[in-house]
Amino acid sequence: MPLLEVRNLSKTFDLAESPFGGRRAGEVRAVDDVSLDIHEGETLGLVGESGSGKSTLGRLILRLIEPTSGVVLFDGVDLVKANGSELRRLRRDMQIIFQDPFGSLDPRYRVEDVIAEPLILHQKIIRGSLSRDARRQRVRELLRAVGMDESAMPCYAHEFSGGQRQRIGIARALALQPKFIVADEPVSALDVSVGAQIVNLLQQLQHDFGLTYLFISHSMPVVRYLSTRIAVMYGGKIVEIGSTEQITTQPRHAYTRKLLAATPEMAAS
Ligand SMILES: Nc1ncnc2c1ncn2[C@@H]1O[C@H](COP(=O)(O)OP(=O)(O)O)[C@@H](O)[C@H]1O
Ligand SMILES: [Mg+2]
């Protein structure tokens, strides 16, 4: 059984209610009848141009937004119907890494609090008790797992470079030992060499913790490097899905060929 089963998933936004739509009337079908599986331990790359619906699909899969129609099964459990304790368990198992994890965060938070927050929230829910010392110990472990150390704990997140901030965001995502992570353009805001380090870190963490990834990017080379399989998205639809080898050497869909041709080093190979 796949870890995730997505069946006929669609999301329509009403433009009148949209922050982007202004006064335009009508609807945009951001995700249009998408079906796919994600297997335990794999990295499914999701590639497509800006506006093709990648982030909306990632958020639907995590149920950060409600679908217009369709089904998402995680570990065999219907995510759209789940509620109460079942949904909380699923929420712990599924996390997201953003392009800039601190774009939306209060700069008054210290690194220790940023990483400990999911632990504290979760403790409240399960009414468990992790002592403050145990929690700090866990934060130290998480920082080490992402290649940092405890000297970062009292600092503010915005004092760090983009690459270090992304490491802190990853540590936070790992705090509750998730099984599945959606990484939404996690290296798109970084320099190539810093991005490569983050990509390698994600691979290492996958190996160490048995993680499954949905890795979203507009960049075919990045997706090719990291993915077991690749799904190509265009206009809200998955136009092609296959092994990384098949997609990059024998693309079937014209749009996939266009994406490959737009990447000189790949068109040549
Ligand atoms: N909250 C929203 N309200 C209205 N339209 C949205 C919203 N979020 C995304 N969209 C629209 O849905 C489409 C897909 O967006 P998105 O999923 O962000 O694409 P991508 O991540 O591939 O760039 C775009 O046309 C975008 O404008
Ligand atoms: Mg996006």
Image: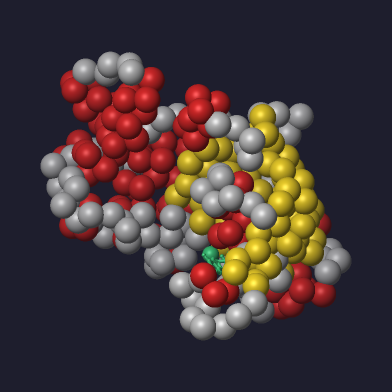
Q: Nearer the viewer, residue 31 or 212?
A: 31
Percent of width and height locating residue 30: 65, 66
Q: Quadrant of the C terminus?
A: bottom right
Identify the residue shown where x is 18% and y is 45%: 110
The colour scheme is: secondary structure
Q: Nearer the viewer, residue 170 or 207?
A: 170
Residue 251 shows in this picture: yes
Identify the residue shown where x is 37% and y is 59%: 100
Q: Quadrant of the N terminus?
A: top right
For this view, does 37 lie left or right of residue 132? right
Answer above or below: position of 5 versus 200.
Answer: above
Q: Quadrant of ligand 1?
A: bottom right
Answer above or below: position of 222 versus 83.
Answer: below
Identify the residue shown where x is 46% and y is 72%: 19
Percent of width and height locating residue 71: 72, 43
For this view, does 34 lie left or right of residue 12? right
Q: Nearer the viewer, residue 250 or 212?
A: 212
Percent of width and height locating residue 44: 66, 49
Looking at this rendering, what residue extends furthest in the left direction? Answer: 154
Looking at this rendering, what residue extends furthest in the bottom direction? Answer: 23
Q: State the image quarter where residue 260 is shown.
A: bottom right
Residue 142 shows in this picture: no
Percent of width and height locating residue 138: 29, 26
Q: State the image quarter where residue 102 is shown.
A: bottom left
Q: Nearer the viewer, residue 140 or 6?
A: 6
Identify the residue shown where x is 70% and y is 29%: 76
For this view, does 162 lie left or right of residue 33? left
